[in-house]
Amino acid sequence: MVSEKDHNVSRRQFLTYTLTGVGGFMAAGMILPMARFAIDPVLQAGAAGDMTAVADVSDLTEQPQRFDFSYEQKDAWYTSEVTETAWIYQEGDEIVALSPTCTHLGCTVNWDANEDYPDQFFCPCHGGRFEKDGKNIEGTPPTEPLHKYEVEVQDGTVYLGKAEPQI
Ligand code: FES
């Protein structure tokens, strides 16, 4: 037969287990998201190397053409769709993909857009100009070349990675 004293002890134990369980559950609820936040960038490190299919090689010419492309970007808990643009051309065996972001203050450059400066990238904001290979033209505001995308070709498709500085 169970005495009154045994009941008291088991109630106390029940409360101890319950409070420990609830406390542990709450602590896990706070600590796990923090741990994930700290570790997530490490787990995502490989994603930076991902390539996106952007164009068919058969569509390329020796003149830079504008291609827009989108991909999913994961930041911590958020997944968002990012749209980027590349100016792509082919010269011999080489495929070149340049970022349209002006290296002066970040406006968007266009190819062959100013009749005074044919066959150059022109930035309308402050008159920045770049050669076809992205090199900045001396005497204009930009002080470094347009960034260049990492390019890979597979089965006739051009894949782009990250745009990196050319210097
Ligand atoms: S932002 Fe392009 S020249 Fe200034």
Image: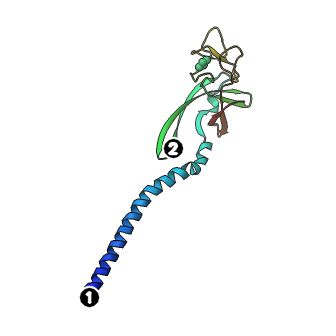
In the depicted view, which residue is nearer to us: 41 or 99? 41
Residue 107: x, y in percent?
Answer: 56, 21
Mark 1 lies on a secondary structure that is loop
Residue at x 60% of width, y 43% of height: 48
Colour setup of the view: rainbow
In the rendered image, which residue does mark 1 sit on?
3
Residue 27 circle label: none
2 or 1: tag closer to the N-terminus = 1
Of discs 2 and 1, which sits in the foreground?
1
Q: Is residue 93 left or right of residue 146?
A: right
Mark 2 lies on a secondary structure that is strand
Mark 1 closeness class: few <14, some 14–19, many ≥20 residues within 10 Å: few
Residue at x 66% of width, y 38% of height: 153
Q: Which quarter of the rendered image does ligand 1 occupy?
A: top right
Q: Decide: marks 2, 1 in contact (CB < 8 A)? A: no
Q: CA distance from mark 2 to mark 1?
A: 60 Å
**Quadrant position of residue 8:** bottom left
Residue 118: x, y in percent?
Answer: 66, 12
In the rendered image, which residue does mark 2 sit on?
74
Q: Quadrant of the C terminus?
A: top right
Instruction: Check the image and name the residue furthest to the right.
Output: 92
Residue 1: x, y in percent?
Answer: 26, 91
What is the total number of numbered labels drawn onto the structure image? 2
Residue 62: x, y in percent?
Answer: 68, 23
The amino acid type, in three-letter code, at marker 1 is Ser
The amino acid type, in three-letter code, at marker 2 is Lys
Label 2 CB sits under 8 Å from any ligand 1 atom: no
Please indicate, yes or no, whether residue 161 appears anywhere in the rendered image: yes
Q: Is residue 80 left or right of residue 154?
A: left
